[in-house]
Image (cartoon, rainbow, N blue to C red):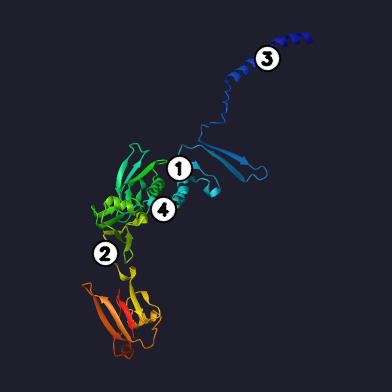
Amino acid sequence: MKSISLNKLLPSALLFLALATLDGGAQTLNAPAVEPVNSNISQNPKKINKIENSENKNQTSAAVEEIRPTGTTKIQGEADITGATIEPELYPAAVKTPEIAKRTAALPPTEIYKIGFGDVLFISLQNAPSRASTYFTVLNDGTIDYPLAGEMISVAGLTSQEIEDLLRRKIKLYENPQISVRVREYSSHSIKVLGLVERAGEKYLQREAVPLYVIKAEAIVESRAALVFVKRTGKTAAEIIDLRDPKSDDFLIFSGDILEFKSNENITVNRPPIEQVPQFYYIGGEIESGGQKDFYAGISLTQAILASGGLRKSDAKRVIIRRKNQSGLLSTFEFDLNAIKDGLQLDPLLQPGDTIEILK
């Protein structure tokens, strides 16, 4: 009996096993393929990995790896500034600004030019589609109207390089704007040249200061010019430069200066103020310390005697003053010291060039 039962069950068991095998194969064929993971390239530009702390599940920290198009760089830090971004080219420019200012301040005035009102600037944006280049005149308030900056830009007192840096930080429409700024017309640094020159008139400097020889070459100074009077802003008296001095060519001329070239012949016609030209009087005779003495406006005869050490002999009382008149001839004036002392005669005021003789 048992043998018959096993024989009957064997075909059924074999059929069951065959069906099970076919079903497992079907499941294997229908299973989805597993994509290989590429660790270098992510289809999602923002890949966020969360790291959980096994000891405290309420505290998490995020490690953010972000792939952005060229033009922005992510700066990671504390939680409140994690999302902040900054332009990579603008950030170095911001650092560069004080460096440019420091380098400019260290340069001599003959090597820099600071923009002023009236100057015409040629500004070009190289990485714009049309490579736009335009002229901009500096307005009276020291600004230019540069549309891409979004506002009026103050440029007075800046160099071309400093303006480039300023605009580079202001322009937001283009990434890493390639700005070039050049001065097309120099109009803010002017001087006036007068006198013995072929090309008199207003001149414009292309530096904060230029040596005198540059002006001489531009104005073509006449051979008979021996002196140049330089009237400088803020000073009441002119500086006199002797053109025969080899060092005179290095004298620096600044914006606002007025230069007048003269010969020795007309130097006395336009004499500068007395305080700028040393003047003298001369004293001799019965005096302790005679000779050439410095003249000061308002000095009197008795003061001049005291400044020369006083009288050599107490009985000296006559004084003769000789002075050139308008004709160039000497005029003689005599005074009595005793009468001056007693208030019977005025104590005369001296003039430059007077000759004083003390007699008994």
> Disc 4 or 1, which lies upstream in sequence?
1
Circle 2 SS class = loop
Which residue is painted at 31% across and 89% down in the image? 339
Residue linked to disc 4: 108
Residues under numbered marks 2 and 4 in contact, where contact means CB atoms less than 8 Å apart: no
The span from disc 2 to disc 4 (Cα, nearest Å) is 33 Å
Residue 153 badge: none
- Quarter of the picture holding the N terminus: top right
In this orientation, does residue 232 appear? no
Residue linked to disc 3: 17
> Disc 2 or 4, which lies upstream in sequence?
4
In this rendering, the answer to whether 246 lies above or below 180 is below
The span from disc 2 to disc 3 (Cα, nearest Å) is 132 Å
- Quarter of the picture holding the C terminus: bottom left
The span from disc 1 to disc 2 (Cα, nearest Å) is 61 Å
In this orientation, does residue 307 appear? yes
Disc 2 vs disc 3: which is toward the camera? Answer: 2
In this rendering, the answer to whether 137 lies above or below 266 is above
The span from disc 4 to disc 1 (Cα, nearest Å) is 30 Å
> Disc 4 or 3, which lies upstream in sequence?
3
The span from disc 4 to disc 3 (Cα, nearest Å) is 100 Å
Q: Position of residue 117 (x, y in %)?
A: 31, 54
Residue 267 badge: 2
Density class for disc 3 (Cα within 10 Å; few <14, some 14-19, many ≥20) is few
Label count reads 4
Density class for disc 4 (Cα within 10 Å; few <14, some 14-19, many ≥20) is few
In this rendering, the answer to whether 73 lies above or below 349 is above
Residue linked to disc 1: 89
Q: Label 3 amino acid? A: Leu
Q: Position of residue 158 (x, y in %)?
A: 38, 52
Density class for disc 1 (Cα within 10 Å; few <14, some 14-19, many ≥20) is some
